[in-house]
Image (tube, rainbow, N blue to C red):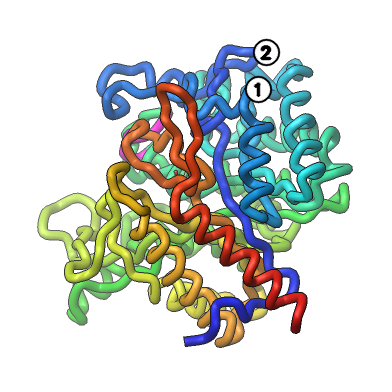
């Protein structure tokens, strides 16, 4: 197994968060409502009725959080910008106080020697845009491009690299197909125009950012898909799922074309959403880096009942996280090699923009998270040794935070947050990560 300290020069160590999951202050300083404010208020939508109204109160406590990041030794911090803080109704007038918050945050990060890596959209669509159809409405893509221009006009002088979207697969499927996330629509496959409009938004924004000399990434949550058995039926089901989860969100950006979704019964024009020239708008700007969010592989079998052409099957005999997700670190190495083999020269450098696990609060001293990160970093180092260009690792997450439909029940943080007092307490994984980053730096400076 390659030595995990033997990583390329300039390899970035980071941690990641997202606005609605940590900021709180949802009605302060002119922020407009987002789909998550509205969805979380719906009885039964989120476990125990939890909302992000206060979350980690990062809006007020960001100096304390940045001090913790500095002590950790981070090179970079990935956060998201809340669109409804900047544009309370999604388009129309800018909220100066909202932009000023991100201005302060960026300056404080730079003062601490940490490079900001903002994501422009991490699921908190302004509710006013949702009222007009949300991502099912093509206009939302154009509103996103305008928003990207406004934000980068203000911050682009200090922030060199940007992520347009976080996990359009999860937002489309949970938010528009199944309704377990905001905005809570249950359109099944007819949700797919929302996928196309997000990718179009990415392409339009990427070209604006490139005109300003900024680097652009897209963060996809990808999963290696394995058939439950070698049977033809399971193999076909696994291929159909792979096209939906992975290729649908990566092929248009890297190859300029959509994958074949006919096994799912989806029309080539994604229910009329794809207009002539769209695939060029998505691919032409190019990507400076692919953001990869990795949590687990997926095992698929042929369906046992009518409906979708695949069934999910658990992966037994491996550890599972507190969320119940299987822990298979070598699947990360496999995924990275698959990406290299599938996309070849079209694959830009990869940054791991999320990787981590939820651990039950009472588990001390947080050993499952240390084991998880350590094993995934070994897998990453193995992929680098096999020739994959990987530039950084951002763990999910810096802080325990609002885990969407699970409310505050899943704890992904290196830092424990007591949500009643807002007391932050670094966990054993924080100390482990700090020591690992420091050891890597020492090794780097000696070689
Ligand atoms: O908390 C989420 C994050 O918002 C997106 N990626 C997966 C994480 C864990 O579920």
- Dot 2 or dot 1, earlier in sequence: 2
Kindly identify the residue that appears in the image at 87 percent across and 47 percent down: 212
Quarter of the picture containing the C terminus is bottom right
CA–CA distance in space, label 2 to label 1: 8 Å
Nearer-the-camera pick, 145 or 447: 447
Looking at the rendering, which quadrant does residue 292 occupy? Answer: bottom right
> Which residue is denoted by mark 2 in the rendering?
29
State the image coordinates of residue 381 (x, y, percent, origin top left).
54, 78
Looking at the rendering, which quadrant does residue 433 occupy? Answer: bottom right
Q: Nearer the viewer, mark 2 or mark 1?
A: 2
Magenta highlight on residue 385? no
Give left or right: position of 301 versus 252: left
Residue 85 tag number: 1
Looking at the rendering, which quadrant does residue 98 occupy? Answer: top right
Residue 96 tag number: none
Kindly identify the residue that appears in the image at 77 percent across and 55 percent down: 215
State the image coordinates of residue 373 (x, y, percent, origin top left).
45, 64
Dot 1 crowding, Cα within 10 Å, few <14, some 14–19, many 20+: many
- Which region is colored magenta? 177-182
Q: Is residue 423 above or below residue 169?
A: above
- Name the residue at the left extreme: 304
Nearer-the-camera pick, 312 or 80: 80
Give left or right: position of 11 versus 227: right
Q: Could you tell me if residue 380 is visible in this image?
A: yes
Q: Main secondary structure of the magenta part?
A: loop
State the image coordinates of residue 416 (x, y, percent, origin top left).
44, 40
Label 2 with label 1: CB-CB less than 8 Å? yes
Give left or right: position of 383 versus 51: right
């Amino acid at each position: 197994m390659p030595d995990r300290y033997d990583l390329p020069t300039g390899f970035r160590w980071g941690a990641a968060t997202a606005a609605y999951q940590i900021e709180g202050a949802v009605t302060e300083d002119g922020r407009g409502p987002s789909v998550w404010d509205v969805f979380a208020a719906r009885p039964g939508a989120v476990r125990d009725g939890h909302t992000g109204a206060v979350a980690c109160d990062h809006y007020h406590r960001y100096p304390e959080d940045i001090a913790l990041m500095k002590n950790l030794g981070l090179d970079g911090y990935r956060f998201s910008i809340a669109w409804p803080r900047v544009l309370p109704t999604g388009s129309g007038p800018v909220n100066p106080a909202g932009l000023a918050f991100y201005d302060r945050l960026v300056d404080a990060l730079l003062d601490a020697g940490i490079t900001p890596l903002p994501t422009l959209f991490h699921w908190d669509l302004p509710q006013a845009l949702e009222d007009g159809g949300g991502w099912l409405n093509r206009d939302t893509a154009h509103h996103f491009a305008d928003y990207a221009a406004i934000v980068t006009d203000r911050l682009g002088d200090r922030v060199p690299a940007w992520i347009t979207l976080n996990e359009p697969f999860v937002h489309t499927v949970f938010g528009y197909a199944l309704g377990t996330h905001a905005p809570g629509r249950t359109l099944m496959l007819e949700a797919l125009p929302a996928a196309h409009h997000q990718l179009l938004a990415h392409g339009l924004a990427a070209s604006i950012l490139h005109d300003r000399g900024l680097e652009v990434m897209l963060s996809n949550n990808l999963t290696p898909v394995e058939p439950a058995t070698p049977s033809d039926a399971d193999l076909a089901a696994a291929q159909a799922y792979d096209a939906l989860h992975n290729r649908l969100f990566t092929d248009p950006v890297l190859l300029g074309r959509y994958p074949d979704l006919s096994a799912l019964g989806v029309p080539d024009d994604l229910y009329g959403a794809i207009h002539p020239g769209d695939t060029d708008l998505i691919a032409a700007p190019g990507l400076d880096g692919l953001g990869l969010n990795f949590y687990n592989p997926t095992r698929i079998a042929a369906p046992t009942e009518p409906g979708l052409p695949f069934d999910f099957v658990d992966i037994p005999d491996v550890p599972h996280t507190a969320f119940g997700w299987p822990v298979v670190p070598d699947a990360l190495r496999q995924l990275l090699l698959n990406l290299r083999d599938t996309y070849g020269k079209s694959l830009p450098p990869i940054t791991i923009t999320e990787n981590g696990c939820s651990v039950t609060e009472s588990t001390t001293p947080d050993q499952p998270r240390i084991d998880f990160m350590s094993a995934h970093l070994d897998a990453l180092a193995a992929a680098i040794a096999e020739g994959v260009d990987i530039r950084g690792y951002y763990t999910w997450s810096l802080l325990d935070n609002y885990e969407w439909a699970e409310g505050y029940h899943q704890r992904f943080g290196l830092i424990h947050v007591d949500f009643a007092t807002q007391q932050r307490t670094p966990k054993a994984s924080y100390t482990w990560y700090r020591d690992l980053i420091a050891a890597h730096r020492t090794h780097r400076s000696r070689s």
